[in-house]
Amino acid sequence: MEIKPKEITKEQVDAQLSICEDIKKEIGTGRYAMVDTFGCQQNEEDSEKIRGYLSAMGYEMTDKEALADIIVLNTCAVREHAEMRVFGNLGALSHVKKDDPEKIITLCGCMAQQESVAEKIRRSFPQVSLLFGPDELWRFPELIQSVRESKKRVFALGKGDGCVVEGLPHLRSDKVKAWLSIMNGCNNFCTYCIVPYTRFRERSRRPSEIIAEARELVFAGYKEITLLGQNVNSYGRGLSEETDFAKLLREINAIEGDFIIRFMTSHPKDATEELFSAMADCEKCENHLHLPLQSGSDRVLSAMNRRYDMEKYNNQVKKIREYLPDVVLTTDIIVGFPDETEEDFEETLRAVEEIRFDAMFTFIYSKRKGTPAYDMPDPFTREEKQLRFDRLLETQNRISEEKHKEYIGRFERILIDGTDKKDACLTGRTSGGRLVRLSGDEALIGSFQNVKITDCNTWALRGELI
């Protein structure tokens, strides 16, 4: 049975903003809040909403735990390592809470939505005053007020129906690049992934709301807008109006202004020729496609429930390169999925050699309780998986450097987006998302500049202004 997401009304959001005003009057001035974000870009965008609410309540942002009256940990559940970091941080915060019992320590995000984590927090981490899942973010002011008034712990986990919310305040941390969420949740249920259980079923925002927000961002001076979704290729499904991601790209591209459109993430089973055509036609769209492969073995892909095979994936690579011959193609690969044999791994290595990705995000499989893969037999040791990981990384690093060397002597238009304090230089990215380091004045941040590529290493290009 299809679960229909609930739509949060403007009146409900206005009620939350009214609570913000009440809190602002109550607390006065000189109050601070800290938001620490773990995980994906969707979490980064959620944290901007949390900061927006906190600012509306009258809190100033700080990165000092001792100074903060409210500390928010916005968490990730995709890998065990991220969860261990959060538990470590919570342990350290027990001393901060002891020094200031009125401090409100909050745990939210995908990790918080898991029943097992909520129970562990309830039992073992009394310093946590508030816990809520991603679906409850929209009523953050109400939850904070409840903690303040009751002096009791508040736990609010989503019910699994998902929701669509418009009109939440944002406090963005960047003045050049902006996140823009177009959808939330996921319907794919890959056997290793916890996301469909923490962010629930996919639901799309209406295109009119997305386009209006994109227009506001361009008007505010943002030069890079990244469209976010667990699977942007399935955008539009379930909406009453007929639309899809390719159409949305074209509509955002039509907004007047000098800016670049990026997006993530694309699921290969839903990547279409219409998308590739739109990318080629839209001059503001990035020349980059992140297309997670996960494994080069059909047997492992089937066990992962990815719903494509290598033949389909290779055909998509061929097609995108027909539309965009210079496309920067990046991917994700999981090493050591349960019962991945040496032969399976060799097939992944061959795929990487043949496709020649520009870059790759590689992870050793992390068991996630509550997913089908959690109970799959896994006869291989961590050491064996690490050896495979190292071999794969060595292969990709060689390919990445070879591809970077092809850029030396070329001219590229890049968006200068910040600085690298360690190397004392500016940083920027090409249309394909390649990192470029160069010398120049910080006044150039937020502008497009033409550069000549003069050198490179595995991870970045070196350029000079022309």
Image (cartoon, rainbow, N blue to C red):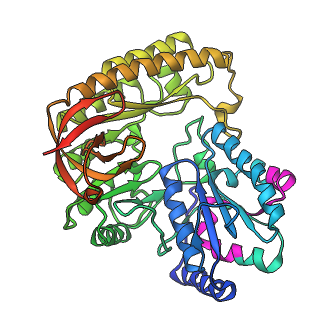
From this view, report whether residue 370 is shown above or below residue 345. below
Q: Is residue 357 left or right of residue 155?
A: left
Nearer-the-camera pick, 428 or 420: 420
Q: Position of residue 165 (x, y in %)?
A: 51, 70
Pick the residue in front: 367 or 233.
367
In the rendered view, tell whether residue 149 sits above or below residue 129. Answer: below
Residue 438 visible, this angle = yes
Name the residue at 50% across, 54% down: 42
Residue 6 appears in the figure: no
Looking at the rendered image, the quarter that the N terminus falls into is bottom right
Among the 4 quarters of the image, the one containing residue 191 = top right
Left or right side of 464 for 114: right
Where residue 96 appears, x then y in whole percent? 77, 59
- Is 103 left, or right, of 364 in this rendering? right
The answer to if 369 sits in the magenta stretch is: no
User: Residue 68: x, y in percent?
Assistant: 67, 67
* Residue 405 in the image: above or below residue 180: above
- The residue sitting at 27% across, 28% down in the picture is 404
Please give the range of residues in magenta: 119-144
Residue 363, horizontal then vertical, whole percent: 54, 30
Q: Main secondary structure of the magenta part?
A: helix
Q: Is residue 138 highlighted in magenta?
A: yes
